[in-house]
Amino acid sequence: MSWLEIYADDAERARRFYSDVFGWQFRALRSFHADYWFTDGRRQAGAVFPRPAGARPGAIMHVEVKDLPAALARAAALGAARELETDAYVVVRDPDGNALGLWAR
């Protein structure tokens, strides 16, 4: 895993929960549509975002891959569906409906 997006109805509650459970360090951001960046103590590891209206609960784990087109083809062959595509990454839904972000440098 290279990045984790946590979507929350209450960003402060999410910050307290993940800080207390995992010891992650947070700092307020208020840009890029995020409320907080967090770190695992070694590197920036993710962000807490407001949950969009109507969005289902859950976080998005982002994984760096060497070859994005090849990874997307494998994911599609195994039942994943593309949900969002940007210049930087693609979000797919696995066969069970979980969101997964794929990106390559």
Image (cartoon, rainbow, N blue to C red):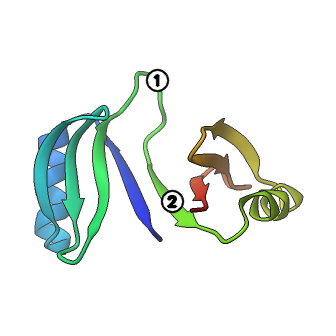
Quadrant of residue 79 within the rendered picture = bottom right
Say if 77 sits above or below 31 in the image: below
Return the residue found at the far bottom.
Answer: 42
The C terminus lies in which quarter of the figure? Answer: bottom right
Mark 1 vs 2, N-terminal side:
1
What numbered label is drawn on residue 13?
none
Q: Which residue is pictured at 73% across the width and 67% down the height? A: 67
The amino acid pointed to by label 2 is: His
**Which quadrant of the structure image shows residue 64?**
bottom right
Residue drawn 35% across the image and 33% down it: 51
Please, which residue is most extreme toward the right here?
A: 77
Instruction: Give the camera-side residue of 33 and 78.
Output: 33
Q: Please name the residue shown 89% across and 60% down the image.
A: 77
The CA span between labels 1 and 2 is 22 Å
Q: Residue furthest front?
A: 105
- Give the residue number, with chain letter if any, for mark 1: 54
Packing grade of label 2 (10 A; few <14, some 14-19, many >=20) is: many
Residue 27 percent across, percent down from the top left: 10, 52
Q: Which residue is mark 2?
A: 62
Q: Nearer the viewer, residue 43 or 55?
A: 43
SS label for mark 2: strand
Please name whichever residue, 97 or 47, is drawn nearer the observer in this view of the structure.
Answer: 47
